[in-house]
Image (cartoon, rainbow, N blue to C red):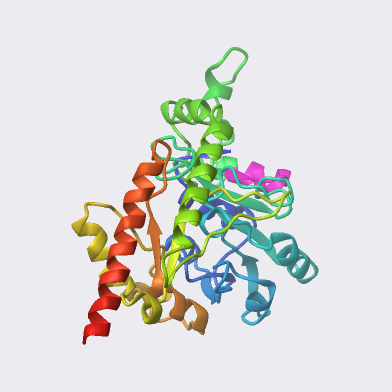
Amino acid sequence: MALNSCTAALHLGLLAMGVGPGDEVVMPSLTFVAGAQCAREIGAVPVFADVDEQTLTVTVDTIAAVTTERTRCIMPMHYAGRPAPVREIVEFASPRGIRVLEDAAHSVGMLSGGNWAGMHSDGAAFSFYPTKNITSGEGGLLLTHDAQIASRARRLSLHGMSRDAWKRYTAGGAWRYDVVEPGYKYNLPDLGAALAVGQFERLEELQAERESLARAYLERLKEIPGIHAITQFVPEPDRHAWCMFVIRVDPEVAGITRDMLIEEFRAANIGTSVHYIPTHLFTAYKDLTANVPATDRIWERILSLPLYPGMTTRDIDDVAQVLRDATSTRRIAENVA
């Protein structure tokens, strides 16, 4: 169902899957804060699993390390649009009665085993935010094959009402309705839905453009020491969504830190970002235990480079030139010193 944000999809997904006060929700700390926020809003406890340093996604092993009898849901994230090992996670979770809700915010256009996120799990939450592969200006989607989850989430998205406006006011509808339980105003407005439909019609075209840009980045990064692409192509039937292009900066080799490199890009008028500051480092979540050594190591070295439809290979050449100049200058300066 279409909703007004991915956060709304995560929130309703947790509620519809029966997660409540005192339950634990396992998730990466290396993700946007929305997952932890949604867990806390319903009285559940976010529990942070570490990530694999090559894929930046959680694994069955990192999840198992923090799973307890109170674990009610696992929320793996497909980092940058690279498929996380969801089927293996479901195989771990199902016998234990644990739900799996995929954080698929980066995953429009991604394929996992030839399917969209949410086909092997209990559900998946997608984002249509402006920086994502498909946008409705602001919006999201909850995808599930479980009819009970879909029914409750749909009801909760419209104040808990038993009938939405279409069922009340169209021909043959009835004006009377009930509010079955307290709910929220989470539906996607019609204008946003119209934008999303138009974008979906171009999805394969937009996906091909992102893949072409990613190949150009990978080719240029080969010659720059200390700069490594975290995001890589994946073998079929999987498909990377290329929502972001993320590099790892090894300062010992590059001669420059990630934070210094951000300033070099800023001086060149090129925007970059960091995905993400881990949730456990925020003031509001410092009360939570987080034994995530890989996350703590990697987050200070990762940087997201520009990647968007309409970008040209000349733009990528400009990005690569900043990387070449920054790393070369620092190495020369160190050698002179």
The magenta region covers: 142-153
Queried whether the magenta region covers residue 91, the answer comes back as no
Q: Closest to the observer: 105 or 40?
A: 105
Q: Position of residue 294 (x, y in %)?
A: 51, 80
Q: Nearer the viewer, residue 203 or 333?
A: 333
Q: Check the image and name the residue furthest to the left.
A: 267
Is residue 135 placed above or below 84 in the rendered structure?
A: above
Which residue, as the protein is rendered here, is positioned at the far top? 171
Is 303 or 314 nearer to us in this picture? 314
Q: Position of residue 199 (x, y in %)?
A: 50, 30
Residue at image position (34%, 59%) is 273
Quadrant into which the C terminus falls: bottom left
Q: Is residue 179 rendered to the left or right of residue 300?
A: right
- The quadrant of the picture occupied by the N terminus is top right
Residue drawn at 48 percent across, 29 percent down: 193
The answer to whether residue 37 is visible is no
Question: Which residue shows up at 32% across the image and 70% down it?
Answer: 327
Q: Residue at x 51, y 38 (%)?
A: 209
Residue 176 % position (x, y):
55, 26
Residue 296 seen in the figure: yes
